[in-house]
Amino acid sequence: MEGNSIPTTIGAQRGTASSRKGNWVEEMRGSLMVVATVIATLTFQIAINPPGGVWQQDSTIQMGCVAGNDCRAGTSVLATSSDNKNQRLRYEVFILLCTVSFSASQTVILFLLTGFQLRNRLMMWLLILVMCLSVICLSGAYVISIWMVMEPLNKVINKITWYYALFWGGLIALLCLGLLIRFLVWLVKSFFRLLCCCY
């Protein structure tokens, strides 16, 4: 019950607030490391094993390769087996989103491992926003992979996929907006505290 006692002095209250801030930073640091590692692993795996797989051997037109495409072993089947320009564009956007997500996760991991000025909330907020970018790109890659694998989509699957994309896009936008508002409120409070302390 000693940990649940109510502080009786102002100094004790300040110490408690300071330790809560330190605990928040450490908890966020641990959470960010876990999430960044999982996303980096996932996006790396997606890049080396894309939806639809890869050609197992050099392929020709008789094996499903479209004339004019380079169907060498290890290249993506979905990117090269269709003469549909939309399919190729979807694949390129898919790879771009996976790359951005992977790079954002690697950035967070690098900052967390080096301990680069992570004791303040500003740096943690920036890392959280980078992780939001990573999750947004991962969600976009998922939707595009559904479109690539299930080409041509029937109307029901197409609607479900669009609703899914809109739901996640809206939810992530709202979360990012909430984080941005919280960050701006914290920044304004810090600014006014600094002004009050100076005068």
Image (cartoon, rainbow, N blue to C red):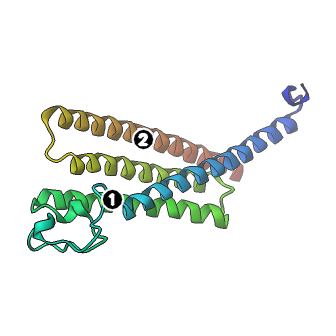
Viewer-side residue, 115 vs 63 = 63
Say if residue 116 shows up in the picture.
no
Q: Name the residue under label 1.
A: 50
Q: How many labels does the image show?
A: 2
Which amino acid does the dot numbered 1 rest on? Answer: Pro
Residue drawn at (50%, 58%) of the image: 41
Q: In the rendered view, tell whether residue 22 sits above or below residue 46.
A: above
Which circle marks residue 111 in the picture? Answer: none
Q: Is residue 54 above or below residue 139?
A: below
Q: Residue 187: percent from the left, percent from the top?
A: 56, 48
Q: For residue 114, what is the image quadrant?
A: bottom right
Quick one: SS at disc 2? helix
112 relative position to 183: left or right: right
Q: Which residue lies furthest to the front in this view?
A: 62
Is residue 12 among the parts visible in the rendering? yes
Picture residue at 30% right of the left edge, 55% below the top: 51
Give the left or right position of residue 70, taking residue 122 as reference: left
Q: Residue 177 carries which label?
A: 2
Compared to residue 42, the image places residue 66 above or below, namely below
Taking depth in this image into account, of 77 and 57 the one nearest to the observer is 57
Classed neighbour count for the residue bearing mark 1: other residues with Cα under 10 Å, few (<14), some (14–19), many (≥20): many
Q: Which residue is drawn at 37% across and 41% down?
A: 173
Residue visible at 60% across and 54% down in the picture: 33
Residue 71 percent coordinates (x, y) = 20, 72
- The quadrant of the image that shows the N terminus is top right
* Alpha carbon distance from label 2 to label 1: 32 Å
Q: Quadrant of residue 118?
A: bottom right
Q: Label 1's element?
A: loop
The disc labelled 2 sits on which kind of residue? Answer: Leu
**Residue 89 x %, y %:** 18, 60
Other residues around mark 2 within 10 Å, as few (<14) / some (14–19) / many (≥20)? few
Mark sitting earlier along the chain (2/1): 1
